[in-house]
Amino acid sequence: MKNIGSNLSNMIKKIPQDIKITEKIDNGYNSNTFFCKYNGEKSVLKYSNSKSEYESLTREYEICNILFNNSSIDVPKPIYKYEQNNNLLIIFSEVNTYIPNSLDWKNKQFCKDIIVSSAKVLNELHDNPKIHKKANESEYCNQQKNKSRYLNKQLKRIRNFDMINEKKFEDSVSYILNNNYKTRFSHFDFTATNYSFHIGIEPIYDWQTCGYGDALYDISIFDSSVIDEFIYYFHSQEFVNELRDKFFELLNINIDMNRYTIYKYIHTSVILWNIANNRCTDLWLNIGTEQEIYNQTKNQLETLNKKVEKIINDA
């Protein structure tokens, strides 16, 4: 493949293994991701040429190695790592991805399988002592997530967005920052776009943001991006409530509903901002229009607005 950049091209030339890049992957965030053939096998190549990308990519490689060898969580298998002058190239096995269609989402058993498998993955990720021990020994995986930096980044993103009450969003961020919680190892981007849907979910990918922090973040973003966004679109409120109750029942941790609701408000606000800025996911566009998901997310946010206002006023 042509036009991959001179740095990456020069790195590949110095690697003894046979690497042929076949296609660039446009995931909207990291432009240096490619499908390739590594010694003839279909694989995924990721490349970094900056310090921040180097750290996040190393983190992803190390945690996938830890999870692959110490858990039942299905992740891309780390195959190869090469460093040169602070540039990093890593190769993972290619994962089989499946984007559900409308018939899938209308199938109640399909939705139930997603709930069960998600709870299983989150329980193991948050509570498996082998994962925690190995991650804690890793220079790149043992970081404490800076929730202040992340939440304020989201606050900066939604400023001047008419559909979101900036003061309420600020109050929500303050509520989370002033709340204590048990630290657990977490994914921190456990959205519908970062796993494949077969029978349930898995494999799970894009681990560059993982670290130690509030497990409710993973749980609430799953709820916002899967239950509220997709399952609710095709099913009754009664069925959605049933699934959410089952999800909570299967989880190993107690849910602080106030903190959980605040997180969901933050996630839903960011989802609405993304849709309004033409960043609707292929996962959604496979089943509906941007206007449909915008209207649904707007309604979800209005419902959360009332709950958040009461939580903050009572705090």
Image (cartoon, helix red, strand yellow):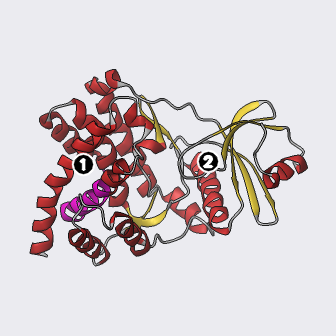
Horizontal side of residue 314 vs 31, given as left or right: left
Q: Which residues are magenta?
A: 251-269
The amino acid pointed to by label 1 is Phe
Q: Which residue is mark 2?
A: 69
Front one among 210 and 272: 272
Residue 309 lies in the magenta stretch: no
- Against 202, residue 143 (above or below) is below
Q: Residue at x 22, y 73 (%)?
A: 167
Where is residue 77? Give x, y as percent: 64, 42
Disc 2 versus disc 1: distance between alpha carbons? Answer: 28 Å
Depth check, mark 2 against mark 1: the one in front is 1
Q: Residues within 10 Å of mark 2 (few under 14, many from 20)?
A: few
Seen at 20% across and 31% down, the residue is 235
At a point 47% along the width and 41% down the height, the residue shown is 195
Q: Nearer the viewer, residue 190 or 306?
A: 306
Q: Does residue 254 appear to the left or right of 39 in the view shown?
A: left
Circle 1 residue: 248
Residue 262 image position (x, y, % from top left): 23, 63
The answer to whether residue 252 is visible is no
Dominant SS of magenta comes to helix
**Left-right relation of 135 to 313:** right
State which quadrant residue 109 falls in.
top left
Mark 2 or mark 1: name the one nearer the start of the chain. Answer: 2
* Residue 198 image-quadrant placement: top left
Residue type for callout 2:
Asn
Residue at the limit of the structure toward the bottom, as seen here: 178
Q: Quadrant of the C terminus?
A: bottom left
In what element is the residue under mark 2? helix
The question of residue 256 being in magenta is answered with yes
